[in-house]
């Protein structure tokens, strides 16, 4: 009987458990100290920026990508593929060398 009551309580607790998501904000205080808060306590802080939405999606950053300089060295696609294949070959040989002592 006691076991049935415990099982019933656990099942009802699991059924009524809410989502643990909330908007997350990064707030900077007067002393420059960063604090992470949810939407409810955000009103107690200044200089808050949202960093994560309730659905788990990250907030878009205000930072813009730095363009590549015109004089930056560039290689063609075929050369990059050859380099990648060579790196893969080296890594696989190292992996096989590590596997030998284990077997």
Image (cartoon, rainbow, N blue to C red):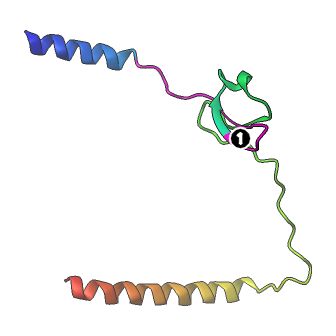
Q: Looking at the picture, how far across and down is residue 84, in whole percent? A: 59, 84
Tally the marks.
1
Q: Along the line of sight, which residue is nearer the eye, 57 or 37?
A: 37
Q: Say if 89 sits above or below 45 in the image.
A: below
In this picture, residue 63 sits left or right of residue 86:
right
Q: Quadrant of the N terminus?
A: top left
Identify the residue at the far left of this view: 1
Please indicate whether residue 42 sits to the left or right of residue 17 in the image.
right
- Residue 37 position (above or below residue 34): above
Residue 41 x %, y %: 66, 23
Q: Is residue 71 above or below residue 53?
A: below
Residue nearest the observer in this picture, 27 or 70: 27
- For the point 18% across and 15% down, the residue is 6
Residue at image position (33%, 90%) is: 97
Front one among 67 and 83? 67
- Which of the 4 image quarters holds residue 33? top right
In terms of depth relative to the viewer, which is nearer, 45 or 53? Answer: 45
Work out which quarter of the rendered image holds the C terminus and state it: bottom left
**Which percent across, then down, holds residue 25?**
68, 34
- Side of 76 where 82 appears, left or right: left
Q: Within 10 angstroms of label 1, few (less than 14), some, or many (20 or more) residues?
A: some
Magenta: predominant secondary structure element?
loop
- Judge whether residue 53 is colored magenta: no
Measured from the top left, where is residue 68 in percent x and y? 86, 73
Q: Is residue 23 magenta?
A: yes
Residue visible at 66% across and 38% down? 35
Question: Taking 51 as reference, is 9 left or right?
Answer: left
Q: Residue at x 76, y 85 (%)?
A: 76
Q: Which residues are magenta?
A: 17-34
Q: Which residue is mark 1?
A: 59
């Amino acid at each position: 009987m006691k076991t049935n009551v415990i099982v019933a309580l656990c099942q009802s607790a699991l059924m009524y458990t809410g989502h643990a998501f909330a908007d997350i904000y990064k707030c900077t205080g007067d002393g420059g100290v960063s604090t992470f808060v949810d939407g409810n306590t955000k009103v107690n802080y200044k200089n808050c920026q949202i960093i994560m939405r309730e659905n788990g999606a990250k907030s878009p950053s205000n930072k813009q990508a730095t363009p590549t300089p015109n004089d930056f060295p560039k290689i063609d696609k075929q050369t990059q593929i050859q380099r990648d294949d060579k790196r893969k070959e080296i890594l696989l040989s190292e992996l096989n060398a590590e596997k030998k002592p284990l077997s």
